[in-house]
Image: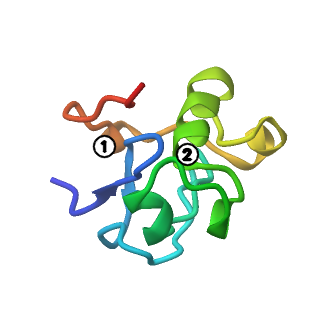
Amino acid sequence: MSNKYACPCCGFLTYDDEPNGTFEICPVCFWEDDDTQNKDPKYCGGANKISLEEARQNFVKYGAINLNLVNSVRSPHADEYNSNYKIED
């Protein structure tokens, strides 16, 4: 069992630490952990420039938080899938 934490954007278990402002970047979607944005998903600015809400929509469409970051992300590993996570609409 992995002791990883779910990315607030894509939900995959990629973070080494609980997402609470660590500024760790998810290798699957490229979301940078920003506690302000985690607490207010509609907030634009901070580490990611776009809101968490928009980043989630982009991840569904493109596989990354922005179309221009598609080549910077990787597919999730088998042990990173999180059956308890659903991207919020």
Classify residue 41 as left or right of residue 44: left
Q: How far across and down, in percent of the image, does residue 15 sit?
A: 39, 63
Residue at 66%, 46% in the rendered image: 73
Near-viewer residue (72 or 36): 36
Is residue 72 depicted above or below 39 in this figure?
above
Indicate the secondary structure of the residue bearing disc 1: helix
Circle 2 or circle 1, nearest the eye: 2
Distance between the alpha carbons at the discs numbered 2 and 1: 13 Å
The kind of residue on which mark 2 rests is Val
Q: How is the image coloured?
A: rainbow
Q: How far across and down, in percent of the image, does residue 22 sit?
A: 45, 78
Q: How far across and down, in percent of the image, does residue 13 sit?
A: 34, 50
- Extreme residue toward the right, this view: 68
Is residue 29 depicted above or below 40 in this figure?
above
Q: How far across and down, in percent of the image, does residue 65 sit?
A: 65, 42
Residue at 43%, 56% in the rendered image: 40
Is residue 41 depicted above or below 53 in this figure?
below
Residue at 33%, 73% in the rendered image: 17
Near-viewer residue (78 or 44): 44
Near-viewer residue (51 or 67): 51
Looking at marks 2 and 1 on the same chain, the residue that comes earlier in the sequence is marked by 2
Classify residue 89 as left or right of residue 60: left
Circle 2 crowding by C-alpha within 10 Å: few under 14, some 14–19, many from 20: many
Classify residue 1 as left or right of residue 79: left
- In the rendered image, which residue does mark 2 sit on? 28
Mark carried by residue 79: 1
Indicate the secondary structure of the residue bearing disc 2: loop
Mark carried by residue 21: none
Residue 87: name its quadrant: top left
The kind of residue on which mark 1 rests is Asp
Q: Are marks 2 and 1 in contact (CB under 8 Å)?
A: no
